[in-house]
Amino acid sequence: MVASPLRLGVNIDHVATLRNARGGPRPDPLRAALLAVEAGADGITAHLREDRRHIRDDDMVRIKAGVSKPLNFEMAATEQMLDIATRIIPHAVCLVPEKRTERTTEGGLDVVGGHDHLVPFADQLRRAGIRVSLFIEPSEEAIEASVSIKAPVVELHTGAWCHAIEVGDAVLAESEFSRIENAAVFAYDRGLEVHAGHGLDYDTARRISSLPQIVELNIGHFLVGEAVFVGLAEAVRRMRKAMDAGRAAAS
């Protein structure tokens, strides 16, 4: 297949984490979102958690109003979040799992076990004019459930692959990458738009960009960390360059 253009969604959650560590208005997630877009981001992602540990309600409103690029609203499938989403009307909602005790999202959403809850939930978002995405494990079972839920987009969880690379387990890393690759093909063949994210850095983003079925990467923590050393705009530009190099390998 011919590789489609590859989009970069920049997650600005951890700019808010820095702000909240001390209190006050700085650093401002909206300013970070605007810088990211100026540097080449195709969209902005933000996760409004139940405990508001980083992004807050007013951040979502300000980002939606202040950024010209699409807003991808990550959230748990709860009535409170549904109410907020249908008032803000972001471009997209990505439904993710959420636990109070986790530091970051651990694994994909249980779309198989939660199928019956997610079907009407996704339908309400669609009727509000919001594109629905599901953050899932790279498995055929999760993809089939996503099709049944009628979500047009899935985001494949890349965390296990990235972690295997970080700890130096080359065998597991290759196994996990194969799982992502197979899932991307399977999801594409089932008519879904395929995204990917979690734990990606320059090197892993470059490699996964070579998969032609994937049309969007969502990256946050690494870029905010790199911003400490090179600035956010430069980190986004370097990520865009890595993705473009990986995409070129797919053509």
Image (cartoon, rainbow, N blue to C red):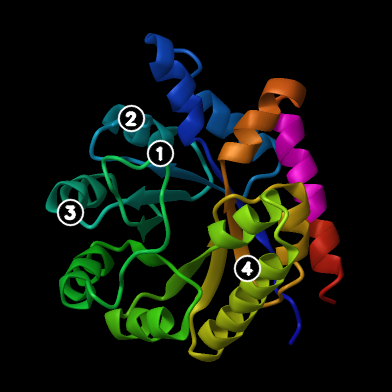
**Quadrant holding the C terminus:** bottom right
Q: Position of residue 237 (x, y in %)?
A: 77, 40
Residue kind at label 3, given as amino acid type: Thr
Q: Are marks 1 and 2 in contact (CB under 8 Å)?
A: no
Query: Who's the residue at 33% across and 82% down the image?
Result: 145
Residue at coordinates 37% horizontally, 10% vertically from top-left? 23
Mark 2 Cα-neighbour bin, 10 Å: few <14, some 14–19, many ≥20: some
Q: Is residue 115 visible?
A: yes
| Residue contact at pointers 2 and 3, CB within 8 angstroms | no
Q: Which badge, 4 or 1, comes first in the chain's sequence? A: 1
What secondary structure is found at the residue carrying circle 2?
loop
Question: Circle 1 is placed at which residue position?
Answer: 103
- Magenta residue span: 233-242
Type of residue at label 1?
Arg
Q: Nearer the viewer, mark 4 or mark 1?
A: 1
Residue at screen point 49% across, 31% down? 14
What residue is disc 3 on? Answer: 78
Crowd tier of the residue under label 4, counting other residues whose Cα lies within 10 Å: few below 14, some 14–19, many 20 or above: some
Give left or right: position of 205 versus 119. right
Disc 4: which residue: 215
